[in-house]
């Protein structure tokens, strides 16, 4: 069977072939050339995860593993300022004196203030004393900061800091 | 002429004797900045301070205890130099009134002279705003430290004036100042007496001054207690060692109204709930003995052969010839017990926290009936507005009334009182956490009874 095409139809077929060729170059060829493939977009953890990770590291302490291990775990998920906060305020002598071993678990986290590159999260969680089983906890405001596209824990906010932030429009 | 000379001499002596003892920086430090011999170095002292920023009461004290930290040095006469840690100094500058940096009139507090090392500013008589601005300038790279200082001196929340970008590296700067020996002590405060200083007179100072036999009457009103004469060891052997009994700390918290409080969302009149917290710290009692000599008259009735005659009193009447009545004065030593009481004050945080069972009920049971039900404000903290003080018996009493608290989450709340005490001259500071009571807040629910 012979297929006869009009001039207009021929032009359409040519256009279709050209379009298919462009599409093949743009989308199909890169599949065979992994070196030039664009990276898959990765999920950037949001401030919530950073707030939870930071508080969990900060409040989970074990006198038997020592100060350096604890500080390292905090600094791994913190900004430089957050790492300094942990080092500045922690009284490790008190940890040794009370033989502290504790585990922090988060129940909920709610975004309280979005300041663009900074977020304040209200985190509700419980600290469990691994020596006695006693639990205590509550809600605490946490500041997280985005550095190079990655959210990191900075510090838990003092009441006066939170009041100042909440007063902002 | 002689009379005139005596009169002038007497005037000069009187004038000298009424001059208050006033130490200077030179009494503490030599030209190289080293402590002079004779100065008592008391190391780090932590004291509770209302003006340090607040965190929820459940935050472990090993991560933040709300105490101000100073390195303390004192002269035997009681004059004291305090060197606040970098963090303490920053928070002092942010709260200049509450921390005592400036007095109620907004002037540099006359109780102490202030020296800021790195700014080279000796600030007795300096403009308070300049001093606070200089302090804040050490920590914050902001062009508006004066504006910030003015706000802080006015008693406003200085954090509100700060921009977020200014504090983003704050703790890093404070940590750097703490680590660097040259900048460790940025400011020094000189107090005319340890009694006027925020740290008070720590037991270690009193012990050291006693050990040196230099404890002034203002610090050791009973002399170099526990023993004056004879030696303390002898007193301890004969009478017993001195003892300190710290007063009991007790607290109560009650809901005073209404009988059935309902959560804010169902309380159109915003009645809320009234709470009252009370804390009592009983006095700390210091007991010690002194050996005191007492003259005793020894009355005897002696027979002609020299033997003692036993007679009922009064001996001087009943002892008759040929017996001989004799009175002999003898010195006897006896242990005298002394008791001193001290008031132990405290920085107190009142808290209410929704119990775990109620939290679980909201997040599980209630969330099934009302999807999306969650905890809104399960934790409450209060510190300010309390009435407090020491009464005549040296008992510390602290009461806080909170009216119309707008409870958001229904359930049972545990109320606690926590904090840290100031200690006393004979006992160290201590922390406490007391379950003080509980209250409930109701949620009205509609149920269809089939």
Image (cartoon, coloured by chain):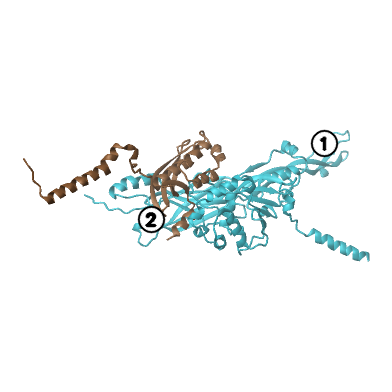
Picture colour for chain A: brown
Chain letter belonging to callout 2: B
In-front residue for pair B215/A45: A45
Earlier residue among tags 1 and 2 = 2
Chain letter belonging to callout 1: B
Q: Secondary structure at mark 2?
A: loop
Image quadrant occupied by the N terminus of chain A: top left
- Residue drawn at (59%, 52%) of the image: B89
Q: Kindly identify which residue carries mark 2.
A: B261
* Image position of B184 (left or right of B253): right
In-front residue for pair B190/A2: A2
Q: Do the residues marked 1 and 2 share a common chain?
A: yes
Where residue B209 appears, as percent x and y from the top left, is 73, 45
Task: Please identify the residue farthest to the left as the structure is shown.
Answer: A1
Where residue B257 appears, as percent x and y from the top left, is 42, 57
Task: Please identify the residue farthest to the front as the structure is shown.
Answer: A7
Q: Secondary structure at mark 1?
A: loop
Chain that appears cyan: B
In-front residue for pair B203/B90: B90
Q: Kindly identify which residue carries mark 1.
A: B309
- Residue drawn at (26%, 42%) of the image: A25
* The quadrant where residue B388 appears: bottom right
In space, the residues marked 1 and 2 are separated at their CA atoms by 84 Å
* Image position of B172 (left or right of B442): right
Image quadrant occupied by the C terminus of chain A: bottom left
Query: Is residue A130 visible to us here?
Result: yes
Query: Is residue B225 visible to us here?
Result: no
Asked if marks 1 and 2 touch (Cβ < 8 Å), the reply is no
Query: Is A68 above or below relative to A113?
Result: above
In-front residue for pair B442/A80: A80
Q: How many marks?
A: 2
């Amino acid at each position: 069977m012979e297929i006869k095409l009009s001039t207009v139809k021929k032009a359409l077929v040519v256009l279709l072939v050209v379009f298919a060729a462009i599409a093949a170059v743009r989308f199909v060829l890169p599949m065979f050339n992994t070196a030039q493939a664009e990276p898959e977009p990765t999920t950037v953890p949001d401030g919530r995860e950073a707030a939870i990770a930071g508080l969990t590291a900060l409040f989970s302490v074990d006198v038997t593993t020592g100060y350096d291990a604890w500080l390292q775990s905090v600094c791994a998920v913190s900004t430089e300022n957050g790492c300094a906060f942990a080092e500045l305020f922690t009284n490790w002598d008190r940890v040794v004196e009370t033989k502290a071993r504790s585990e922090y678990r988060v129940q909920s986290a709610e975004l309280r203030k979005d300041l663009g590159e900074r977020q304040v999260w209200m985190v509700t969680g419980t600290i469990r004393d691994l020596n006695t089983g006693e639990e205590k906890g509550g809600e605490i405001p946490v500041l997280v900061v985005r550095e190079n596209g990655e959210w990191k824990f900075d510090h838990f906010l003092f009441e006066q800091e939170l009041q100042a932030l909440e007063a902002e429009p | 002429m002689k009379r005139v000379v005596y009169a002038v001499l007497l005037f000069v002596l009187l004038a000298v004797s009424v001059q208050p003892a006033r130490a200077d920086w030179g009494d503490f430090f030599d030209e190289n900045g080293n402590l002079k011999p004779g100065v008592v170095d008391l190391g780090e002292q932590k004291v509770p301070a209302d003006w340090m920023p607040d965190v929820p009461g459940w935050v472990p004290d090993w991560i933040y205890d709300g105490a101000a930290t100073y390195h303390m040095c004192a002269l035997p006469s009681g004059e004291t130099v305090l060197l606040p840690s970098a963090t303490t100094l920053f928070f002092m500058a942010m709260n200049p009134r509450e921390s005592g940096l400036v007095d109620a009139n907004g002037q540099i507090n006359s109780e102490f002279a202030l020296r800021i090392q790195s700014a080279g500013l000796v600030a007795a008589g300096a403009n308070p705003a300049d001093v606070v601005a200089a302090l804040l300038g050490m920590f914050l790279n902001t062009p508006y430290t004066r504006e910030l200082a003015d706000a802080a001196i006015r008693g406003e929340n200085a954090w509100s004036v700060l921009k977020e970008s200014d504090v983003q590296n704050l703790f890093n700067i404070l940590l750097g100042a703490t680590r660097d020996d040259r900048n460790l002590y940025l400011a020094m405060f000189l107090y005319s007496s340890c009694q006027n200083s925020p740290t008070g007179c720590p037991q270690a100072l009193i012990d050291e001054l006693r050990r040196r036999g230099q404890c002034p009457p203002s610090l050791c009103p009973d002399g170099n207690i526990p023993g004056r004469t004879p030696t303390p060891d002898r007193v301890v052997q004969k009478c017993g060692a001195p003892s300190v009994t710290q007063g009991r700390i007790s607290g109560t918290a009650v809901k005073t109204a209404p009988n059935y409080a309902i959560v804010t969302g169902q309380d159109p009149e915003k009645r809320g709930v009234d709470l009252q917290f009370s804390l009592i710290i009983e006095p700390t009692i210091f007991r010690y003995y002194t050996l005191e000599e007492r003259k005793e008259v020894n009355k005897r009735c002696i027979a002609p052969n020299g033997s003692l005659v036993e007679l009922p009193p009064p001996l001087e009447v009943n002892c008759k010839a040929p017996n001989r009545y004799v009175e002999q004065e003898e010195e006897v030593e006896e242990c005298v017990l002394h008791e001193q009481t001290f008031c132990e004050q405290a920085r107190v945080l009142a808290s209410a926290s929704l119990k775990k069972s109620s939290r679980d009920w909201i997040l599980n049971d209630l969330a099934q009936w009302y999807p999306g039900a969650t905890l809104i404000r399960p934790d409450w903290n209060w510190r300010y507005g309390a009435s407090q003080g020491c009464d005549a018996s040296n008992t510390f009493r602290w009461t806080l009334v909170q009216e119309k608290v707008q409870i958001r989450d229904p359930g049972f709340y545990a109320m606690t009182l926590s904090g840290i005490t100031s200690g006393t001259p004979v006992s160290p500071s201590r922390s406490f956490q007391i379950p003080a009571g509980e209250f409930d807040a109701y949620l009205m629910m509609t149920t269809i009874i089939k």
